[in-house]
């Protein structure tokens, strides 16, 4: 079975290829910010497994749908908050605020992907 990326010496996983594509094409953000978001995400083991399955399946739509189920918008917004905390008394990073707006634009009233 293929894995998303081999672990780094420090134990953190490199950013999966599909994650970068998701960030660039779905969230419309730069690769650099997508990688920063990945580092702030704290993905579950199930999400990591799903990312590997996406690559193994040739990016089959069913696997991508499951990825969306495992990554709710709320989890991405929490990662954005870790990247640029709102309660520090300093202005927030504009690219992170724009990303939050992009995430919210792709949500329904229930906080699920549309």
Image: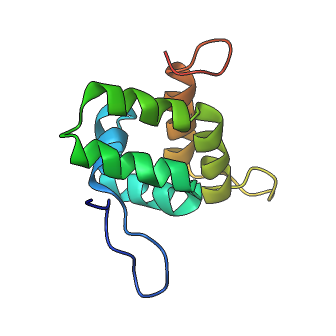
Q: Residue 80, position in %: x, y?
A: 60, 48
Q: Residue 84, position in %: x, y?
A: 64, 55
Q: Quadrant of residue 9?
A: bottom left
Q: Residue furthest left?
A: 58
Residue at left offset 52%, top offset 30%: 69
Can residue 30 be seen by looking at this rendering?
A: no
Q: Quadrant of residue 3?
A: bottom left
Q: Is residue 37 above or below residue 9?
A: above
Residue at left offset 44%, top offset 36%: 67
Q: Is residue 45 above or below residue 96?
A: below
Q: Which of 42/53 is in front? A: 53
Q: Quadrant of the N terminus?
A: bottom left
The way the protein has been coloured in the rendering is: rainbow
Q: Residue furthest top?
A: 109
Q: Residue furthest front?
A: 1
Q: Is residue 22 above or below residue 85?
A: above
The count of marks equals 0
Q: Is residue 40 above or below residue 92?
A: below
Apparent side of residue 13 relative to residue 100 in the rendered image (left or right): left
Q: Residue 42, position in %: x, y?
A: 59, 59
Residue at left offset 68%, top offset 15%: 110
Residue at left offset 59%, top offset 13%: 108
Can residue 3 be seen by looking at this rendering?
A: yes
Q: Quadrant of residue 50?
A: top left
């Amino acid at each position: 079975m293929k894995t998303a990326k081999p672990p780094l010496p420090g134990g953190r996983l490199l950013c999966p290829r599909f994650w970068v594509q998701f960030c660039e094409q779905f969230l419309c953000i730069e690769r650099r910010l997508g990688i920063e978001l990945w580092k702030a995400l704290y993905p579950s083991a199930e999400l990591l497994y799903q990312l590997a399955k996406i690559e193994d399946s040739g990016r089959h739509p069913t696997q991508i749908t499951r990825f969306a189920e495992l990554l709710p918008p709320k989890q991405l917004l929490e990662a954005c908050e870790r990247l640029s905390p709102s309660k520090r008394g300093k202005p927030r990073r504009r690219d992170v605020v724009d990303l939050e707006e992009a995430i919210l634009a792709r949500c329904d009233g229930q906080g699920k992907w549309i």
